[in-house]
Image: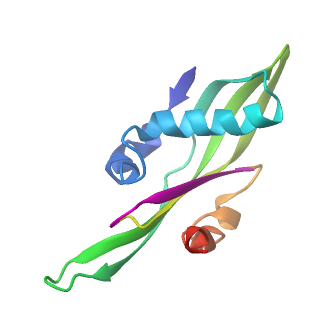
Amino acid sequence: MKVNFEKLIDTKHMLEWFSDEPFEEITATIEAMFIKQAPDTKMLRFEVTSSPQWLTGGRKSEHTDKMILLRSGLAVTCNFTLQNNDDIYDLTGVFTWVGTNLDSDPRTKIWMDLDGTLEEFGQEGLLKERIYALDV
């Protein structure tokens, strides 16, 4: 599989709050989403095409002036190619990954919104809601 995570390199350390191997986790999870719909699906290519939009939330430490990270979320646009049998599909979308309970027992969730935009799903869109989605 061809991958391009160049636009996420500077914030990879933040993605490591969600997974020890974040880039592998991204492609494996997205491919698995489509395999659920069509078992013969294979991802051929994945490319992040925008700078990341992040939201984070925390609480003040009781013992220092530092903040303790509780939740975080990322949204980026991406292009990817899937193959199903002899058919090849070039797709675009917004990839979103959020984590909560980052100070104790972390939980994460991933969304892929096909044909979405950062205006819809980024910092000023649904990302604001999604960083709280796992609290329910």
Q: Residue at x 71, y 28 (%)?
A: 81
Q: Does the magenta stretch include residue 127?
A: no
Q: Does the magenta stretch include residue 109?
A: yes
Of residues 24 and 80, the one nearer the viewer is: 24
Q: Residue 36, how many percent across, how many down?
A: 76, 36
The magenta-colored residue range is 103-113
Question: Left or right of 82: which side holds 106?
Answer: left
Numbered-mark total: 0
Vertical order, 116 against 20 (above or below): below
Residue lying at the far left in this picture: please name it. Answer: 64
Q: Residue 128, how many percent across, how many down?
A: 58, 74
Q: Answer whether residue 108 is visible to the viewer in this image.
A: yes
Vertical order, 87 against 5 (above or below): above
Image quarter of residue 35:
top right
Q: Which residue is drawn at 60% across and 32% down?
A: 46
Q: Residue 120, how many percent across, how many down?
A: 70, 65
Question: Left or right of 72: which side holds 116?
Answer: right
Question: Left or right of 69: which side holds 109?
Answer: right
Residue lying at the far top in this picture: please name it. Answer: 86
Q: Answer whether residue 5 is visible to the viewer in this image.
A: no
Residue lying at the far front in this picture: please name it. Answer: 105
Q: Which residue is drawn at 57% across and 33% down?
A: 28
Vertical order, 5 against 125 (above or below): above
Q: Residue 53, how many percent across, how many down?
A: 50, 60
Locate the C terminus by quadrant.
bottom right
Locate the N terminus by quadrant.
top right
Question: Left or right of 69: which side holds 135?
Answer: right
